[in-house]
Amino acid sequence: MKYIEEFGRKADILKLADKIKKLNVKASLMEVCGTHTMAIFRFGLKDLLPKGIELISGPGCPVCVTSQEDIDKMIAISRKKSVIITTFGDMMKVPGTSSSLSKEKANGADIRIVYSPLDSLDIAKGNPDMSVVFMGVGFETTAPTIAGTIIKAKRDKIKNFYVLVSHKTIPPAMEALLSLGEIRVDGFICPGHVSAIIGSSAYENVARRFKVPCVVTGFEPVDILEAIYMLLRQKQKKEYKVENQYKRAVSKEGNIAAKNVLNEVFEPSDAVWRGIGTIPGSGLKLRGEYSRFDAEKKFALKVRPARSNRNCMCGKILRGVSKPTDCRLFAKVCTPNKPLGPCMVSSEGTCAAYYKYRRN
Amino acid sequence: MCLALPEKIIKIKGDTAVVRTGTLEHDINISFLPGSKTGDYVLVHAGFAIQKIDEEEAKRTLKLVEELQ
Amino acid sequence: MDESIRLAHGGGGKLTEELVKKVILPYFDNPILRELDDSAVIGPIKDKLAFTTDSYVIKPIFFPGGDIGKLAVCGTVNDLAVKGAVPLYISMGLIIEEGFLVKDLVRIIKSASIAAKESNVKLACGDIKVVERGGADGIFINTSGIGRIIADVSSRKAKPGDAVILSGSIGDHGIAVLLARKEFKLRSSLKSDCAPLNGLVARMLAVSKNIHTMRDLTRGGLGTILNEIAQASGVSIEINEEKIPVKEDVKAACEILGLDPLYVANEGKLVAIASIRDADRIIRSMKKNGYGKGSSIIGRVTTGMRGKVILRTGTGGKRFVDVFSGEQLPRIC
């Protein structure tokens, strides 16, 4: 497939791996994005890197960091009358306090998986007597698509479409993680598709304030290896700037039209990241003119504060402090079949990646 | 987080484009990319085109494999 | 004859008789079936027999490349064939929802009969029940099958050094059916690969006595089946990603929806584990059959991590192919 396969040629990969080795630089690099964690495993890239390079998985898995309360809220809505829940497939098996969307569906709730939030709007149009609620999860790549859908709903005068807003943003989380002071990171591998929207300039604060190199990159092997090389070069030269490896899809300013749509519908808010806690300004909430689409306003929801399994280490894993193999529950009690925490159930959760690709 | 696939625009009608990979086609929203043309390759995520793929930059990224020192 | 199926059609009386005579017999006529007694009498058969059963509940009932009728015959024929049996007889139980259109039933039965003819199996017996609206999703079909064993193959017999042979592209059926459900609005000319494979298997068994294992790749896909073989035989299986054929549309649909082709269902593909000495000869014979043109060696059975399946990626790395738990769900991450 075009623009995919050209960036996965074995000869190029081996050349880059060799150049990385010749740099002879040791470093701890964090891949912020869950899709990067998966790609690194899927392409077997860790096997190609020299021993001195450690790759730490970060909190960029929107499914993993959706708060347990938000899952419980969605489950509560699904139990109400005349409601159709629509969601990305990723959310179906995530455990709430005592249930999941998948379990509720088995119990008779009308829960439908969609590929695009626009499909959810079509379902609303086709079912005027039902309240159609979309679970709005995802970072800055996805949030504009929900914003665009809400604008379309307003324009088309759709009265039965709602969104449970649980979107979060990346740069504040990166800053919060470094502020915690728990980890030492020599560089960030920054998410390519989030950056296609927000632009590479969005990381300048992180780089400058914490003196950490940042490289924006794509998801094919050549992209990731080039980015690792660039980060190591920066460390070698004692630089800490933002570089863009993914120039075919990312510019400095990002996608202005998408950002405008995002800002039209949403404004920043505080958000609870599962396993991390509240990060100020890292979430999105609907602006006043669009508040009628807010599922929380429509359904007066009361959910109890979340309790999670005491031995679940997802928090530490999301913050890059621990590895899945450090967790007592990993692969013994907590498996993809019976996940106890979000890191295992998400298709790009760190624990799921380790379980699938590297259980030794 | 973010599965997005480069797909080729084969038809445009207002805010909607038909994109194709192989013989697989679907309709997407291109309101984030005004000025899109048939023949453009765009990154598609959740039914929206989020960015146009720049062919020249793609070539340069591949050249970088040799050029990185 | 009514336009739609009514509860009385399953009652065992005149209407049932009319349905069998007007819809089933025209397509499935043979002396055994025509007896229409409480049991069919078959045999005598002196060889060991293979006996299998499967139920078919697919939605949508009609999909590009087939329908539930064709599937019900091919699925059971294939289960017999890959166990080293020549398929002889099948039974067919229909559970039909009240209101189902007779013309749709005729279409399904006709399709099943064409598959049966191609597989050279006879319908020996059957049953029709009708349930109230909502009691079945249109139509459910159960088929059982009996075959004559001509080779000893088993998931337990894979040996280190054996070749892993795949008969063609993976994921066609699962993706074709998913797209036909129209939940995701992807349009493609992709067709299900639903097909009877007993002809293909006969060719393979004719050229080699060293085929140890054969499995048809249905739900759960190639990834699941290889894991079952690895565990049953206590061996390790290594496969090469580059050698596994995946059609471009399947690849694209999987990328868009976030699915892994290794776990997507197939209905006309098999995997065989055979002595490496016979592998090339087996593949040449497979390519002579219409359903085996894409056959190739995709890997080897090894020692090492017993019970595990390891994939060598196109980029030179290695990873496990784990047992997949449950259903794959489309995703954005």
Image (cartoon, coloured by chain):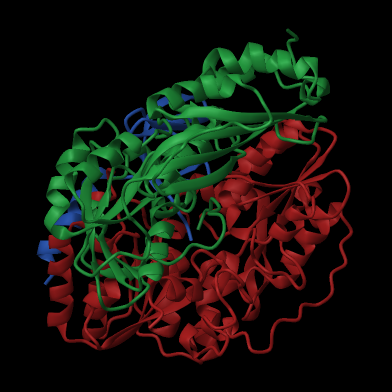
Q: Is residue A165 left or right of residue A183?
A: right
Q: Is residue B53 left or right of residue A274?
A: left
Q: Which chain is red?
A: A
Q: Is residue A127 left or right of residue A55?
A: right
Which image quadrant: the N terminus of chain C? top right
Of C312 and C86, which appears nearest the observer? Answer: C86
Q: Which chain is green?
A: C
Q: Is residue A12 above or below residue A357?
A: above
For chain B, the rendered hue is blue
Percent from the top left, x then y, of residue C69? 54, 28
For the point 44% across and 54% down, which residue is it? C263
Q: Is residue A48 above or below residue A90?
A: below
For the point 50% across and 47% down, which residue is it? C51
User: Residue A319: in sight, yes or no?
Assistant: yes
Of C56 and A130, which appears nearest the observer? Answer: C56
Quarter of the rendering containing residue A308:
bottom right
For the point 74% across and 19% down, which residue is it? C16
Percent from the top left, x then y, of residue A98? 77, 71
